[in-house]
Amino acid sequence: MDITSLFTQFLSGLTYGTILFLVAAGLSLIFGVMNILNFAHAALWLMGAYFSYTFWNLMQDYSFGFWLSIPLAGLAAAAVGWVMEVVLIKRIYKRELYEQLLITYSIALILSDTIKLTWGVTNKLIVRPEIIQKPVFIFGAPLDSYFIFVILAGAAVASGLWWFLKYTRYGHIVKAAVHSREMVAALGIPIPRIYTWVFTLGIFLAGFAGGIQAPIGSITLGMDTAIIIQAFCVVVIGGFGSLLGTLVGSLIVGEVMSFTILFWPEGAMVLIFVITAAILIVRPWGLFGTPMRT
Amino acid sequence: MDFRKTAAFFVTVIACIIFLGASGVKAGEPYNLGVALGLTGAGALYSADGVEGIKLAVEEINAKGGFLGQHKVELFIRDSQTKPDVGVREVKDLILRDKIRAVINDYSSAVAMAVKPIAQEYKVLHIASISNSENITKINPSPYTFQVVPNSYMQAKAASVGIAKIANQKGWKEYITIASDYEWGRSTQAEAVKFLKELAPNLTLKKEFWPRLGETQFTSYITGIMAMKPDFVFGSVASNDNVAWMEQAKTYGFFDKIPYPGSLITVTELQLQAKTLPRNMIALTRAPFFAHMDNPMMTDFVKNYRAKYNKFPSDWAVLSYDAVYALKQGVEKAKTIDTEKVKDAMKGMTVNLTRGKLAFRTIDNQLSCSSYMGTIADDPRYPFPIYKEIVEVKGSESERPESEILEARKAAK
């Protein structure tokens, strides 16, 4: 196995990790701030992919349609997320974790059926512009040219979230709410409104990630069930609520998958679960997380 | 009062009651036909077309009064979600609640195999029109289960014959397989590897890849395979997974670098990926309509299907349409809709289908149907590429010998 092949595999892991990061970032943010384990996150990610297809379809005649459909998918999913938070999620903040899981799981099923009723059961395919239909070569290693955009989008989301949390007033409030929501509330900051916007932002990220996923393969019902498991692995490894943890967890899962496929294809997913289980036993709050609030 | 006439009348009435009671069939009784296909999940893409084919067949049959001109076919369609537990639950419900006499099921061989014993237990006919693992009919055979699609053994043999020829011509030495990690993918890959060993003994299997069913990210598999530089790759990836795999492999220039002969590229993929599918690829499929446009039944089917759905029928529509017509002809041969009699009538029966005159094998109820290999190329008659230079590998050329089936059954016990 030459160095170029190993580098190619590294790039594959990087792209896979980026896709996982985009899905898991919203999941982790919502849990970190609101203590809600949103099982419907992947269903909203899938809805984002379908929204992206619809927008792309409407704007097929325009060269920018393909690119614009991705952020629009995020916005459309965010609108759904906002309604979901205001109507349902708001009522379950103080419930037990298992009740939250059951409710968000029910929402996931409702969303799946809504997708089926809206877009039908046949899968959808977004045709990429000619310019990103061929591979590019980085030091001799081939890379799907669309993945350059995926990696850049992942980097932009990571740095954007980091900037938001570190340098903006709202970011500081969100961070403070992670540690003590009572203290934040005592300062007169309306926690429910903060929660609504954090949830909406998390779902925007899910929809945006769905829009990014859409042109990679076909969009099909059931895609969400596979990705949610891997997204949970990412946040368990990295630590719920930690942006850095989510990024590192995604890259770990992506690279482990990529290299295990090369040397031990049957064991790729097994190894991810072994790492996840080990983290849960040794450090339940993940590599970069903090022990859970009670 | 004429005592003899009265007695004869009552004897006739009682005989009719006994006869109809014994067969459980009332005149004009509707024929409840169940359909349990994976309408969501990995099988959604193929199953939706299957349902369309079934609906069209039922409409045509009902327009002529139904089975035997008197039993209207009533359809009960359920989603197996491509999951064995859900498939079993839905089929049981179809049997107990909707009183179906036959069920067409499933996209997934794993689901079809889980449903087989249920159909046998409740004495309901079970027709596999899309799922094609050989084990559906080979091991633990059920007299109620019939398969109208070329099974995994037949497809693997057909592909292997073609690949071995090319491998010998081109001097290929090493190959890699990529197959979906479930019943169909595993059995097709195993059979292909076995045949290639027999037909091209110089070939070495370098590596096996098993992406899980429902995989959406094939990038690491693609780059991993490309890094190993095999002479060719044999693939058994189906439905949505196949679309994702092909689309992603294409963007890496995979097909320009590595030959990918004999993989399943059905009319669904030909239509869905019309613009992007690499041309000149040698591929395999199960029931392409364009291979039988000389058969009036196929020409009519394509015409009616296009009129109803405004598109050309996929393999799955053809196969599922054929499943209904095979059942119809079984009913006609039995002269009743009584399941026991239809089941017996269908054993070894020759049927007239869109793919020609074909017979069910007595040993396993497998339809002796063809597999099709060809080169993907554009055709001005269709808005998508089709197969050119089609090689039709007949059922008789690709079936597993009966002696091997008996041995396998003995070993399974």
Image (cartoon, grey):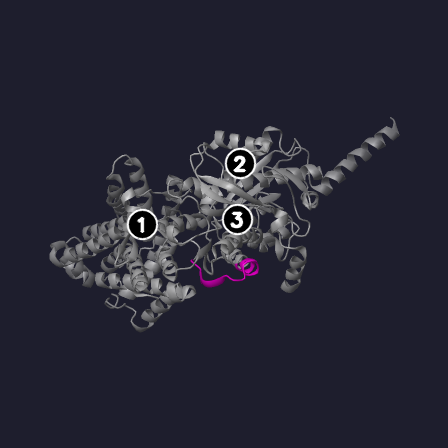
- Residue B145: tell me if it is visible: no
**Is label 3 or label 2 in front?**
2
Mark 3 and mark 1 residues within 8 Å of each other at the beta carbon: no
* Residue B207 in magenta stretch: yes
**Is label 3 or label 1 in front?**
1
> Dot 2 corresponds to which residue?
B55
Q: Secondary structure at mark 3?
A: helix
- Residue A265: tell me if it is visible: yes
* Marker disc for residue B4: none
* Residue A41 in magenta stretch: no
Location of the N terminus of chain B by quadrant is top right
Q: Give the x, y percent position of residue B267.
A: 47, 41
Q: Secondary structure at mark 1?
A: helix
Three-letter residue code for mark 1: Gln
Mark 3 and mark 2 residues within 8 Å of each other at the beta carbon: no
**Is label 1 or label 2 in front?**
1
Q: Is residue B357 above or below residue B260?
A: above
User: Callout 2 environment at 10 Å: few (<14), some (14 to 19), or many (20+)?
Assistant: some
**How far is mark 3 from mark 2, CA to CA?**
19 Å
Location of the C terminus of chain B by quadrant is bottom right
The magenta span reads: B193-211
Residue at the extreme top of the image, as rendered: B1
On what subunit does the disc labeled 2 rest?
Answer: B
Q: Give the x, y percent position of residue A220.
A: 39, 47
Quarter residue A34 falls in:
bottom left
Compare residues A218 and B189 and report the one nearer the observer. B189
* Marker disc for residue B90: 3
Q: Give the x, y percent position of residue B284.
A: 50, 47
> Dot 1 corresponds to which residue?
A213
Three-letter residue code for mark 2: Lys
Three-letter residue code for mark 3: Glu
**How far is mark 3 from mark 1, CA to CA?**
32 Å
